[in-house]
Image (cartoon, rainbow, N blue to C red):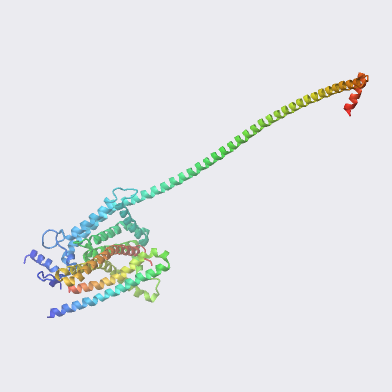
Amino acid sequence: MEGDIVQMGAYIGAGLACMGMGGAAIGVGNVAGNFLAGALRNPSAAGGQTATLFIGIAFAEALGIFSFLVALLLMFAV
Amino acid sequence: MATEAHGAAEPGLVFHPMDQFMVKPLFGEGAVGIFTLTNVTLWMALTVAAIFALLVLGTAGRATIPSRTQSIAELAYDFVRKMVEDVAGKDGLVFFPYIMTLFLFILFANVLGLLPMAFTTTSHIAVTAVLAMMVFLTVTIVGFVRHGAGFLSLFWVSSAPLPLRPVLALIEVISYFVRPVSHSIRLAGNMMAGHAVVKVFAAFAPMIIISTGIGLLVTPLSILAIATIYALELLVAFIQAYVFTILTCVYLKDALHPHH
Amino acid sequence: MASEAQAADHVTESATGLPQLDFSTFGNQIFWLLVTLVVIYFILSRVALPRIAAVLAERQGTITNDLAAAEDLKAKAVEAEEAYKKALADARAEAQKIVAETKAAIKADLDRANVKADQEIAARTAEGEKALAEIRDGALDAVRDVAKDVAAELVSVMGGKADGRSVTAAVNARMKG
């Protein structure tokens, strides 16, 4: 019984942790959208900034991956 | 949940999305020692073989007008070299073979891991943590060797107002030490997540065997989803290799030119 | 419990957790990873990268050389064109000269022939005129003789006695008028 409650808590926590991925999704969309907006205003400067774009996406995405990892840990490791 | 999934007698759908990441000995059963030949060994060896095939056998002709494989090898060479040169600067080119090694290993491990029944070596924290720690140590050592204590100016943001600087320095130091963590978990997490998602959809695919009514709807949908996620994963496999490499270059730039 | 059995137990146990967090496999993974990285590094730094760099450099060299050669050939082509144009112009000038010379020669011939023909024509004309004058003179004399004869005959018929001198004078006077 006690174990079941712990497991239930872990699963609920995993679900809650997954909400962080939504934040990462917003962040990645923000980065990409703003890049596109800027690129359309000044297309000639856009080519040199793709590396920056990917770095920004990577940083935003890493945080979502962290929350995904927390969810996995709660599901499988706790 | 996982224990339930392993109850073989249970009918219905079986979910074990994480089984694909298990490290198993290639021959027989038993414990996994340090030198045991495991599926890790196999897929890393295949990675080496693929890199060898592309970069050594593919360029064996040394043709002035390149064949297709040679063009790809040259493309990869130019791609990474340009990245190192643009991001880390000319003096970063000393590290070009090292960065090329990282890039090719990650790229090929990611892509080979997408083959059905494959084992994705880069989905393991152990592997990516070693890669990230190697980068971290390289950057730190190079920074101190090149600049001595001057490397610490990386944390002292001289363009900020003076009262803010200690706070910023603390943040910079923390973010510096978090780098290998995020660097490694980003790669492993991306690989793991994508493969697990494919596996979850794959578990839904045999629904038609269990229940024809629901299966007619679920099975095509899940197969479509697998195909879509797979395409996305191909993109992710490349982008993660690219991101890992370019972040390495960015960190290397910090070591070579620590002054903001 | 034997260590092997324990280890086997551990393997099955690990299947229930997250495989990535099964620390018993870390040593194995790290070992093979390092082996792999070292192998890749040596493949790249000893064989692949120098070779590709050499190929790229060679290609760059070939392209540069080819461009230079092309530049050379272009210059040569321009030169050849110049020469051709010059030759053409020369030939044209020569041809014009020849044409002019020929024209002049023909004209000279023609002039000469014209002059000769003119002279001949003039000579013939003069000759003809002379002959005509002679004929006319001859005709006048004949007319005068006939007129004298006729006049003498007429005088004699009319019963007069015609002396030659007066008849002649009369005829001459008449002919003049």
Q: Residue extending furthest front? A: C158
Give residue C12's position: percent from left, percent from top. 12, 67
Q: Nearer the viewer, residue B151 or A56?
A: A56
User: Where residue C169 appears, x then y in whole percent?
Assistant: 91, 23
Q: Which quarter of the figure has residue A67?
A: bottom left
Q: Residue at x 72, y 27 (%)?
A: C120
Image: A66 above or below B146 = below
Residue at the spot x=26%, y=72% of the render?
A: A66
| Quarter where residue B164 is shown | bottom left
Horizontally, is C138 left or right of B253 in the view? Answer: right
Q: Which residue is situated farthest in the left direction here?
A: C1
Q: Is residue C100 visible?
A: yes
The image quarter in which residue B192 lies: bottom left
Q: Is residue B215 above or below residue C45?
A: below
Taking the image as drawn, is residue C50 in sight?
Answer: no
Q: Position of residue B250 (x, y in %)?
A: 34, 64
Direction from residue B14 to residue B166 in the image, left or right: right
Residue at the spot x=90%, y=26% of the render?
A: C173
**Across the whole image, how many numbered discs are drawn on residues?**
0
Q: Nearer the viewer, residue C134 or B136?
A: C134
Query: On the rendered image, what quadrant is the C terminus of chain C found in?
Result: top right
In the image, B114 versus A58, the foreground residue is B114
Q: Residue B179: where, in percent of width, then height?
A: 29, 68
Q: Which of the two residues, C9 or B252, is positioned nearer the viewer here?
A: C9
* Image quarter (top left, top right, bottom left or bottom right) of the N terminus of chain C: bottom left
